[in-house]
Image (cartoon, rainbow, N blue to C red):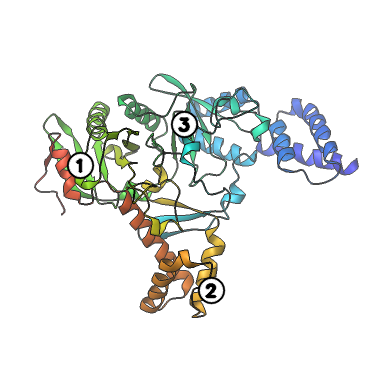
Amino acid sequence: MNDITNRAEELTAYAKQYLELDERDEIYIKNRLLEILQKCDGSEPDEQETDEIFAVLSLLPSALNRRFDNILHSCGSKAATDWFYSYCVHNRYVKKDVLDKNPRFESNGLIITINKAKPEFRDPQKARVGNSVEGGFCKCVICRENEGFGARNKRNLRTVDIRLGGEKWFWQYSPYGYFNEHGIAVNCSHIPMHIDGSTFTKLMDFADMFPHYFIGCNAPLPRIGGSVLSHDHYQGGGEILPVHTAKAAYILRHDDYPDALAEVVDWPGTVIRVVSENRRSIGDICGVINKKWVKYSDIKSGIIAEDNEGVHNAVSPTVRKTERGYEMNVILRSNITSSMLPDGVFHAHPEYHVIKKESIGLIEAQGLFILPGRLSGELAAVEKMIDENAPLLPGYTAFRLIYDETKAICLREGVGAREAMKAELGSICFRILENTAVFKDKRQTVKFLNDLGFRLCSDTNIK
């Protein structure tokens, strides 16, 4: 009992230091902790018991929301999100200690990570139904009703209120985030993912509220969208991703929007960047691009807007604020399939599936690749074969391309297999983004914009 009491004392002291435990509540919280720790019978708490402990130690949602709002209004949005993110790390909802162990490096202008914390996701149908939840009153895994939901170990989940487009939304951080301060903005109403004119307004509302974050929306279609399509939500956070700083290949203007630019981004995917300090111009232009792309077909290029299986075109917009104003990257996506490419014509092609078969969603499309955790062991084995000048072993035939190309890099660059493999992964991820490009030639993107009334700036086009 003495050990349990000491542990309760330690946890209470931790909560006073990091989780803003009020001294008046200390006795009450300590007694709650003793009850939980006694159930552990002296052993180390398991994941569910740890979740329960930190739920007890954390502020109630209402108190946390008030604290966030106080900081927001007195010290600004950066201070508010700094506090909230730190709180979610300290209350163990954000598994930063696990995330920091994920391999991460830059290669070929992209950021490559290997996610050891979550299983590989290969089920587009699961995304369509939205990971529905049984045994509770929350309709899916990102509904606000998950806050405190023990059946999914969400007892220590905390969220804060925001308003986007005049609607009630909330912001929370991802427990297994893919980048710095990775969070999601979620509609308080359980409605399906969709993109219309109001989407661009809501994204800019978020950027106005948190100008130090980017925010974006997955294309609301299976195979190219996120893992939850049944509930309207956006993703963002405190990192500048590679597409954000990619240069323009072509710059165009429109007579009706003299305060705006449309840039064809020098990027392996198909990206149009709309830049202006005028929110209305951004919203109008992005709305026109979206409306045209959703109905756009080019049979020769394999682009089919709609068939008996449904709609296949969608955009994936992402915005951040810079010294130029709002920069809205509109990524053109298609989830059309064919008999030769049943996983998607504009998806990672089969020769790359051993590296990435999951959907190429919003984050990858911006240049941050999240590769499956199984690759840590598999690639290490391939590297060992190369370093030992051994042939590709049975059971690794799917890695033939990677083996051959990595070995060639070793010989060409005079480096070991580990460094060569980083270069190879960057090259493959770049090629995957090229697979996702709906227009393989940037001049096709220019033509797409020409049809909307945009004209090249003769003194600024690069190519």
- Callout in the foreground (1, 2): 1
The secondary element bearing badge 2 is classed as helix
Could you tell me residue 120's position as x and y percent? Answer: 53, 49
Which badge, 1 or 3, is on the more N-terminal residue? 3
- Disc 1 residue crowd, few under 14, some 14–19, many 20+, Cα 10 Å: few
| CA gap, disc 1 and disc 2 | 46 Å
Q: Cβ–Cβ below 8 Å for labels 1 and 2?
A: no
Could you tell me residue 213's position as x and y percent? Answer: 42, 38
For the N terminus, the image quarter is top right
Of 27 and 448, nearer the camera is: 448
Q: Amino acid at mark 2?
A: Lys
Q: Amino acid at mark 1?
A: Asp
Q: 389 left or right of 55?
A: left
For the C terminus, the image quarter is bottom left
Is residue 20 among what the camera can see? no
**To which residue does mark 3 refer?**
185
Q: Residue furthest left?
A: 458
- Residue 447 is labelled as none
- Residue 298 is labelled as 1
Of 287 and 97, nearer the camera is: 287
The answer to whether 357 is drawn above or below residue 306 in the figure is below
**To which residue does mark 2 refer?**
384
Q: Quadrant of residue 203?
A: top left
- Please give the name of the residue rendered at 28% of the width and 34% of the height, measured from the top-left corner: 306
Q: 244 left or right of 101?
A: left
The secondary element bearing badge 3 is classed as strand
The secondary element bearing badge 1 is classed as loop
| CA gap, disc 2 and disc 3 | 43 Å
Q: Amino acid at mark 3?
A: Ala
